[in-house]
Image (cartoon, rainbow, N blue to C red):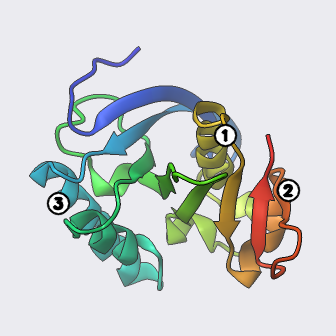
Amino acid sequence: MPPISFKANYLKTVTIPCRSSQNEDVPKEASVVEFDKSDENDLRSLSDVADLWDDKSSTFAYPIYMEAKDKTAPEAHYIGLTLQNSDYNKINPQKVLGLAVFDEKDAPENQLGWLQVDPSNNFSDSLSNRSCKNVGTTLIDYVKERYSNKPIFVNSTLSAIDFYKKNGFENKQGCQDSQLIWQG
């Protein structure tokens, strides 16, 4: 187990398949961490990730950072998946594979507000060319495992509906096709 420091908060070690230099999938350890929006290092890391990813493609990383920075935004969990396995005081943006924002609502269901995978990994020509696989699924699995006390709602982009359905979400009854729910 990696040494733990307290900014960003280490949550869990997971194993994901990543491409080796021989172009084969090999298991690699990654860390699920939670960014603390009151910590300047964590906000700087989110800003650096947003800058890096937005240079590659239009992403949700910048809105995630802006929400974390907003002192009036409701409390939420800013969760990341990183190949960094120590010294979480400063997260290396080059090692961040994905980000998610999760809100524990005072309502019948919680909400997955944002989910973004590093665009250089996510938008490759094919699944076989991705440097690491199952990044988004790993983040969703962590949220479902940790917050299984009530259903999880997501208002998906049209292009991600199939992804969420593959991960156990269903159309929310009486709602638009892009409004999905995981019942647990």
Q: Give the camera-side residue of 130 and 172.
A: 172
Mark 3 vs mark 1, foreground winner is: 1
What SS does tag 1 mark?
helix
Residue 62 visible in the displayed image: yes
- Residue on which the image places disc 3: 44
Percent of width and height locating residue 87: 22, 31
The answer to which image quadrant residue 22 occupies is top right
Residue farthest toward the left in the current orientation of the protein: 40
User: Residue 144, which numbered label?
Assistant: 1
**Amino acid at the residue labelled 2:** Lys
Q: Earlier in the sequence, mark 2 or mark 1?
A: 1
Q: Give the camera-side residue of 152 and 100.
A: 152
Q: Distance between the residues labelled 2 and 1?
A: 14 Å
- Residue on which the image places disc 2: 166
Picture quarter with the C terminus:
top right
Q: Residue at image x 16%, y 51%? A: 38
Percent of width and height locating residue 12: 48, 27
